[in-house]
Amino acid sequence: MDAGKGVGMNTTKSQQLFHKAKELIPGGVNSPVRAFGAVGGQPFFVEYAQGPWIVDADGNRYVDYVCSWGPGILGHAHPRVIEAVKKVCENGLTFGAPTAGEVELSEIIRTCVPDMEMVRLVSSGTEAVMSAVRVARGYTGRDKIIKFAGNYHGHSDGLLVKAGSGLMTQSVPDSAGVPEDYAANTLTAVYNDEESVRKLMEENNGQIAAIVVEPVAANMGVVPPKDGFLKFLRNITEENDALLIFDEVITGFRLSLGGATEYTGVHADLHTFGKIVGGGMPLAAYGGRRDIMSCVAPLGPVYQAGTLSGNPVAVTAGITTLKILMEDTGIYERIDRRAAKLEEAFRETGLSVNRAGSLLSAFFVPGWNVPERKETVPEAKEQERRAEERNVENYEDACRCDRQAFADYFHKMLAQGIYVAPSQFEAMFVSDAHSDELIDRTCEAIRKSIKA
Ligand code: KE4
């Protein structure tokens, strides 16, 4: 990738910090995507963030559309959240014993998502999905699961897999260190492709514990489910006595207060939540049907535990965040409307765009920069082919995008003080702190950054 960096920005302190960090931390970061590997250049180191703004070690300010990969739906350092966290810290940071806050947060989650009849709090999205899959296996007595290419569910061994040689075969590890046999029980289907799921179900009849899916995919860029796809997954799991797991680590409390269930009307057996549910602190959750969750220790035989599970400080951040969302559900209309304005600006530049509520991704699809020849209106069939080619409906479509063009766009936006996710395969997150004025400024920056 071309090594780009903010035009005219002083990044001395960030560069010094990155140099030191690389000596101590693999790649200089504590999560790979932060290293700017997909876009080139060096990451800035954050000094502080407030509302829609993120400020780096050199004092450069950016409008932040990463929002810590989703938690920041209220904007950074919301005063009520900060106040509540400061106050609860004075009581002690962790006890390893039950607290009233865990009961309150679990009840709030169930109020927002009634299908969450029982909840277990954990510390990361990875832990939530890993545990939900284990519960599904324990409940059904079956070993195999189906996931989708392009869906990311955290870094547990059995989910760090990719489609094998022939898509209808078992998956292969997608990371060094994952034994082949750990991948063997994970089958990979094609998102939005019912036939790929049906074949795997038929070929593994009676062996599938669950299908795990991002109800709106956001890890291959944003890819919404086609009409009927989630309902199809609901039906085929019921027909085969398998469970349906909605991985709502991103969509939970983002698409609506009731998450994907409210947004799509489809009910899953188990759900996982992260990011927003913890208000930006290390907290996630899994849960669902009472009969299934009754399998979880100490109630049942499926073991899962955690020293900091339900941590009182994290729980307080989560409770305060969800209460603010419950008190003002108008936030969803506001952030969706603002995201729609960004979508319109991207479309004007010729990019393909997928949006679900306040989640969106612009794709540099093949031919994105070939202006339509106005003098000749292509035949309807040709128009249909071109439109089809521009659709991003699965991982294969997303992989066809021009990543260098994305990298150039990323750095041009950064140079204008707009920080979007440093990867074509990530989402753009809009928060309630992104004012209409900032949205307009971002639209202007988009038009300037993307020149066919
Ligand atoms: P964590 O373990 O990172 O809290 O959550 C894993 C996870 C599970 N499920 C979904 C749908 C997710 O998107 C994630 C994590 N999301 C990424 C961003 N796409 C986190 C960013 C990162 O890895 O640094």
Image (tube, rainbow, N blue to C red):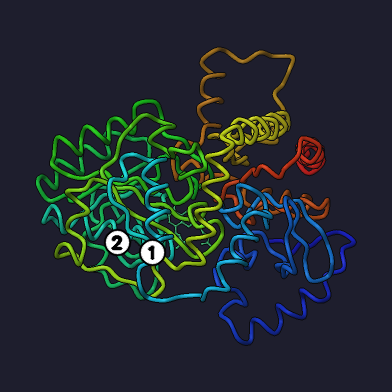
From the image, tell me which residue sits under label 1.
122
**The C terminus sits in image quarter:** top right
Residue 322 x %, y %: 51, 47
* Horizontal side of residue 395 vs 210, given as left or right: right
Residue 2 x %, y %: 72, 61
Q: Residue at x 49, y 50 (%)?
A: 219
* Label drawn at residue 131: 2
Q: Residue at x 65, y 64 (%)?
A: 36
Residue 171 x %, y %: 28, 57
**The N terminus sits in image quarter:** bottom right
Q: Secondary structure at mark 2?
A: helix
Which label lies toward us, 2 or 1? 1
> Quadrant of residue 191 in the image?
top left
In the rendered view, tell whether residue 257 sits above or below residue 53: above
Indicate which disc, 2 or 1, sits on the residue closer to the N terminus: 1
In the rendered view, tell whether residue 418 sits above or below residue 342: below
